């Protein structure tokens, strides 16, 4: 009996892990960290219901930490098998996983120094050494061609339009001579956006796993560049700084693209821009090596991601120097959901300043610092201290890398016949219920919202 167990992103957005079993073999699709609430993050520390050493293969949709960030922990607990991904995802993971480990080690050291952790001593979930070790298990597969993993599993990836290298997967499961086609949406991206290609549309599946991050709402209409130009210009006139917590992959690069465009059009003042994320800087370099994975092209001799007065800050010392900047500036730093990283130090400095502004430019998970700001928090807990929120907080939903409700429905319109089973995943209750209702209303498909750790017969 081919079956699937939902080890993550069931009833929540983060922690994507789907265990597929057929003919005694085990394939794990994605291997992500849980992020957000204390309860969710505790799952990263909890023992998996299966022994990682019994998993035969891991297959990745894309490199985001909520889809890959558990890999070093899986290694720590005994997994030694192949990890399959395309070249861009492999290279991104080579940046993201050690960085994730470094941040966890750094946070553990800081917690020990300040004494605000309940653990004695505070420990990282995994180490940089474990992140480096698991990277040796990667095997690159084609971005858009079929690949056979074993007699039980073969995969055909398609462009998802979400981040560099992101795919949705057609997984063919063969058991006892019977084939079952399962489509994993991964994270579906936006249509008609700069830099990345549009998501390809699926045409058929026996079983569909569809993400529902924004399943209950569409992104705001209107011009991204108009809103950016307005916020940046007004903040600069007040003498404040614009702090943009941004995901290192895709959001930072898209912001650089838009900022360059606005400066060239003289729609914003030519302010100093600090990209304070070593990971984002390294990721930006990858765009030049993977032109086949996006539609951004250099314009004449200029780098389309380059700004005249951009400062790429790799070292901690250079990052700290940004605190001394008192004139108007733009600070782009990770993490995008304000769950860790250097952006915390910038927010501790700038949030109490009523002249400044904070731009939220991506999905903010429940329990994250970004969600607290989005919900109007008057104070934000940073490194054990309550920082007053006096800066203007602005949510620019148009910059999200996730498809909105209408775009998800558009992506599903490619199916020539209803899947036999459709599972709503990677969403909070509002998104899961919203997209389920849209599908049943428009397409009349049966839809299931699986529970965390639930196991389902794929031929049922």
Image (tube, rainbow, N blue to C red):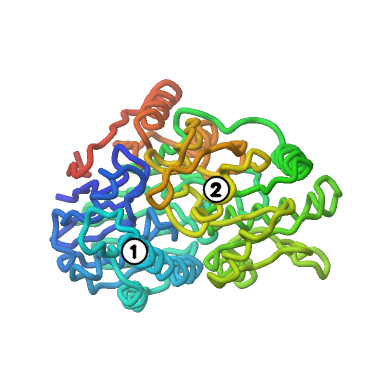
Q: Point out the residue furthest to the top here.
A: 441
Instruction: Decide if residue 40 is in sight here.
Output: yes
- For this view, does 197 lie left or right of residue 30? right
Quick check: 93 above or below 201? below
How far apart marks 2 and 1 lie (CA) works out to 46 Å
Q: How many marks?
A: 2
Q: Nearer the viewer, residue 178 or 381?
A: 381
Give coordinates of residue 454: x percent, y percent.
Answer: 18, 42
Give the residue displayed 57% in from the left and 65% down from the top: 320
Name the mark on residue 113.
1
Give coordinates of residue 249: x percent, y percent.
Answer: 54, 58
Name the mark on residue 386.
none
Q: Nearer the viewer, residue 421 or 337?
A: 337
Query: Could you say which quadrant of the image residue 58 lies in?
Result: bottom left
Instruction: Decide if residue 203 is in sight here.
Output: no
Tell which circle, 2 or 1, labels the residue nearer the N-terminal end: 1
Quick check: 226 above or below 88? above
Contact? badges 2 and 1 (CB < 8 Å)? no
Name the mark on residue 199.
2
- For this view, does 101 lie left or right of residue 194? left
Query: Could you say which quadrant of the image residue 280 lies in?
Result: bottom right
Query: Could you say which quadrant of the image residue 122 lies in?
Result: bottom left
Crowd class of label 1 (few under 14; some 14 to 19; many from 20; radius 10 Å): few
Q: Nearer the viewer, residue 142 or 380?
A: 380
Quick check: 91 above or below 9? below
Give coordinates of residue 138: x percent, y percent.
Answer: 36, 73
Give coordinates of residue 331: x percent, y percent.
Answer: 63, 55
Give the residue displayed 18% in from the left and 54% down from the top: 46
Quadrant, the C terminus: top left
């Amino acid at each position: 009996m081919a079956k699937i167990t939902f080890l993550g992103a069931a009833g929540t957005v983060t922690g994507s892990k789907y265990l597929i079993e057929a003919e005694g073999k085990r394939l794990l699709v994605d291997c992500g960290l849980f992020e957000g609430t204390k309860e969710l993050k505790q799952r990263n520390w909890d023992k998996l219901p299966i022994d990682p050493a019994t998993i035969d293969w891991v297959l990745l949709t894309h490199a985001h930490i909520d889809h890959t960030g558990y890999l070093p922990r899986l290694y720590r607990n005994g997994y030694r098998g192949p990890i399959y991904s395309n070249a861009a995802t492999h290279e991104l993971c080579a940046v993201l996983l050690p960085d994730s480990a470094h941040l966890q080690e750094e946070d553990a050291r800081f917690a020990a120094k300040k004494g605000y952790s309940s653990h004695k001593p505070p420990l990282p979930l995994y180490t940089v050494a474990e992140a480096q070790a698991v990277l040796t298990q990667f095997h690159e597969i084609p971005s858009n061609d079929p690949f056979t993993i074993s007699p039980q599993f073969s995969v055909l990836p398609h462009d998802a339009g979400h981040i560099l290298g992101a795919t949705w997967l057609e997984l063919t499961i063969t058991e006892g001579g019977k084939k079952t086609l399962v489509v994993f949406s991964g994270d579906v991206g936006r249509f008609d956006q700069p830099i990345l290609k549009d998501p390809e549309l699926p045409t058929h599946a026996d079983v569909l796993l569809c993400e529902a991050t924004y399943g209950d709402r569409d992104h705001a209409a209107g011009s991204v560049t108009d809103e950016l130009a307005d916020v940046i210009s007004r903040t600069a006139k007040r003498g404040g700084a614009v702090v943009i917590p941004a995901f290192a992959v895709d959001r930072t690069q898209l912001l650089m693209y838009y900022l360059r465009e606005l400066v060239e059009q003289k729609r914003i003042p030519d302010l100093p821009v600090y990209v304070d994320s070593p990971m984002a800087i390294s990721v930006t370099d990858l765009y030049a090596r993977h032109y086949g994975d996006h539609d951004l092209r250099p314009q004449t001799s200029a780098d389309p991601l380059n700004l005249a007065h951009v400062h790429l800050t790799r070292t901690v010392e250079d990052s700290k120097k940004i605190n001394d900047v008192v004139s108007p500036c733009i600070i782009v730093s990770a993490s995008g959901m304000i769950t860790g990283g250097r952006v915390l130090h910038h927010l501790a400095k700038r949030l109490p300043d009523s002249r400044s502004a904070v731009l939220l430019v991506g999905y903010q998970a429940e329990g994250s610092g970004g969600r607290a700001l989005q919900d109007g928090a008057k104070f934000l807990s940073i490194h054990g201290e309550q920082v007053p929120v006096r800066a203007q907080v602005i949510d620019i939903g148009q910059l999200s890398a996730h498809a909105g409700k209408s775009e998800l429905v558009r992506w599903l319109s490619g199916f020539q016949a209803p899947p036999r089973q459709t599972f709503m995943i990677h969403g909070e209750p509002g998104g899961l219920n919203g997209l389920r209702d849209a599908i049943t209303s428009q397409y009349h498909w049966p839809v299931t919202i699986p529970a965390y750790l639930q196991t389902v017969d794929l031929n049922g």
